[in-house]
Amino acid sequence: MKTRDQIDSKHKWNIASMYPDEKTWGEDCAKAASLAEGFARFSGNLGKSPATLLSAFRQRDELWLTAERVYVYARMKRDEDNRVAKYQAMVDKCQSLVAKASAATSFFTPELLEMAESELLEFIAREEGLKLYEFAIMNALRLKSHVLTKPEESIMAQYSEITGAPGDIFTMLNNADIKFGSITGEDGGTVELTHGKYSGFMESYDRRVRKDAFEHMYAAYKKNINTIAAAFSYNTKTDVVASRVRKYDSSLHSALAGDNIPVSVYDNLIDVVNENLNTLHRYMGIRKKALGLDELQMYDVYVPLIKVPEREIPYETAASTIEAGLAPLGREYVSKMKDGLASGWVDVYENEGKTSGAYSFGCYDSMPFILLNYAGKMKDVFTLAHEMGHSMHSLYTRAAQPFIYGGHSIFTAEVASTVNESLLMKHLLSTEKDPEVKKYLLNMYIEEFRTTLFRQTMFAEFEKHTHQAAESGEALTAEWLSEEYGKLNRRYFGSSVAESEDIRCEWARIPHFYSAFYVYKYATGFSAATAISDLILSQGAGAYTEFLKSGESDHPIELLKIAGVDMSSPEPVKLAMKTFENLVEEFEKLL
């Protein structure tokens, strides 16, 4: 594997566009600390006048914009190479700074909510500048019963630096310390097993390679299983305690409250997917038959069923393919995306110590950066399209919304990324002339449904189960977690897949579990995106573009209605399940 300095600069993100040097970064750290200290002057004075309240809102925005900027820079530098102590220290410094900012501003919402709603509405009417913050004020009033007193909020803010410890511990173990050894590759050579290479090995047509990679990966997690279980358990307990302190019915209610998502949306997803597991079981049977296996193992569930010559797809080719696939989004969208690719949004290739996976990141006034570990496969092309969906969403939103509404809830963000994937897939299916390649792409699309809609819902069900167990006093030991995960895996995959001792430990390698009740949004986002992509192709991208500009200016379910989808109903998930069933039927006929 290459070291960071061996990667061509044109394939690295332009992080210097944020800060030309670390001295300037340090100055912004000092600025954020100063703003945090100065914010105390508003304590006890928010209700003094409309002008005072407006000034407080504006200074709070400036504080968090600055704190966000220094944190994003430090985190991205660490993600370039997690082994570098200097960058670890920079992230630690920023986490302390964020905790300080949280403590300094912790009085704001409790004090705001001490004012009567009528008084706040009068302030808005008297001060034109406060109209910008009206939705934020009314949203705060919605959560009034869960906001603590000013001293209690201060304590919670100071503890924020500690409560993230389980996730940080897992991140360092998973990205810096844990080693998976080496396996013999398809060509007979020795290859180091890494996060980035694992998925490629699991798609190998050499079953011995798949088996070796699978067993080596889980052997490493088994060696650390008790440590990981402790981190997982305390992360879950943190969620449970926080929800109780804030007087929520459960940690699930607490997690969904910020986005104003009814618990019924979460439950509907799990229920509808479980009602359609028979189609997934049917597909597993097709997979077993297509591979000609007497017994389908868990290391057999990712290999493409249609074997076409797997060509290396250069990164530049991937970018041009995506541009063609996203043409239905309009000339302006594609032009902005091309400019971003040329100006250093993307950190392309894997290097030693680099954070695994992919993400879109950045702050309000930075480029919407993308981290990749591009390996030249078709799935990497789709990963780039996915993350570009996030980044373009950020670009449109930040141009249209003020800082306070310049972000996205994950509930809406996952729609933007998955719309891109859906449009790209439909473009490839409609333009591909080779029948075998079309079958390959159809199988790939089916796998997107399986790994996003089914797999992420399975994760969501596991999260719900583990949090309920913690709430009832169950000890989340490594054995208990593995046993419960194993049961869930068997139910989702059905009898066509052999039971696996290793897969019982899969929970131990899922980073998203350290952001509670996050993954269900992948599944709801996929369902919404399936419907929206059809609307774009039939009606144009006008409504969708307006959705991209909306940021957090309303609650997520209301924002998605702008794009034409109502996620408060189970219908989008049911429609996605029907699409999956149709794809499986079509694929089976073609085999």
Image: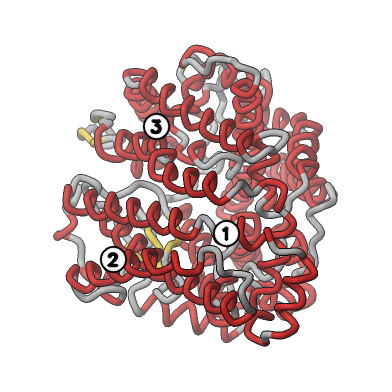
Label 1 vs 3, first from the N-terminus: 3
> At 75% from the left edge and 64% from the top edge, which residue is drawn?
116
Q: Which class describes the residues within 10 Å of circle 3: few (<14), some (14-19), or many (20+)?
A: few
Q: Nearer the viewer, mark 3 or mark 2?
A: 2
Give 94 or 189, whichever is nearer the viewer: 94
Instruction: Label 3, secondary structure: give it.
Output: loop
> At 73% from the left edge and 30% from the top edge, which residue is drawn?
282
Q: Nearer the viewer, mark 1 or mark 3?
A: 3
> What amino acid is labelled 3 in the image?
Asp
The residue labelled by disc 2 is 29
Label 1 vs 2, first from the N-terminus: 2
> What amino acid is labelled 2 in the image?
Cys
C-alpha gap between disc 3 and disc 2: 51 Å
Height in image: 524 above or below 512? below
Height in image: 244 above or below 91? above
The residue labelled by disc 3 is 206
Rendering quarter of residue 160: top left
Give 415 or 474, whichever is nearer the viewer: 474
Tell me the tag on residue 434.
1
Specify the quadrant that holds the C terminus: top right
> At 44% from the left edge and 27% from the top edge, which residue is drawn?
508
C-alpha gap between disc 1 and disc 2: 56 Å
Q: Position of residue 267 (x, y in %)?
A: 77, 37
